[in-house]
Amino acid sequence: ETGKPIGLAHFRAMPSPLRGASAGFLDDLFVDPDVRGSGAADALIRAINVLAKERGWPVVRWITADNNYRARGVYDRLATRSMWITYEMKPE
């Protein structure tokens, strides 16, 4: 309503070799703390879903912190939790 941005979603195509196609990856999702709970995160994720369909991506993936309970509540409503566990390795 004010013309002020209230959030952003940074996403991209990523290779999915076993599918023989590109898939989507959501790198970052941010909603201004003043408007959290307003449905803004839902709207951003749904917009990505529309773009994913237009681009032919079979899936969109993202990760979040285990203790990010508020965001996980949104994600649990809109997506299916995968069976994958994420690992990191830092160069030595």
Image: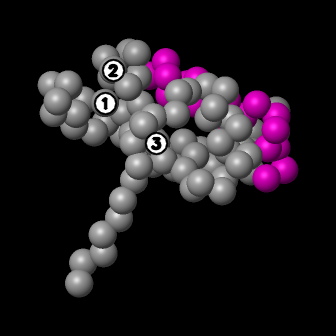
Say which amino acid is labelled 2: Pro
Q: Residue 62 — which label?
A: 3
The quadrant of the picture occupied by the C terminus is: bottom left
Location of mark 1 (residue): 23
Residue 5: image location, x then y, percent: 69, 44
Q: Are marks 3 and 2 in contact (CB under 8 Å)?
A: no
* Colouring style: one colour
Instruction: State whether the magenta stretch is mostly helix, strand or loop.
Output: helix
Left or right position of 27 against 72? left
* Sooner in the amino-acid sequence: mark 2 or mark 1: 1
Instruction: Please tell me whether mark 1 sits on a helix, a strand or a loop.
Output: strand
Pointer 1 local density, CA inside 10 Å: few below 14, some 14–19, many at least 20: many
Residue 45 picture location, percent across and down: 58, 30
At horizontal 66% and vertical 53% (from top left) the residue drawn is 68
What is the magenta range?
A: 33-51
Work out which residue is located at the far bottom of the displayed protein and give it.
Answer: 92
Say what secondary structure mark 3 lies in. loop
Callouts 2 and 1 close, C-beta under 8 Å: yes
In this rendering, the count of numbered labels is: 3
Q: Which mark is residue 58?
A: 2
Q: Residue 73 versus residue 2: which sits nearer the camera?
A: 73
Examine the structure image and report whether residue 69 is included in the region drawn in magenta: no
The x and y percentages for residue 66 are 59, 54
Which amino acid does the dot numbered 3 rest on?
Trp
Camera-nearest residue between 53 and 82: 82
Cα distance between the residues tagged 2 and 1: 6 Å
- In the rendered view, would you say 45 is above or below 72? above
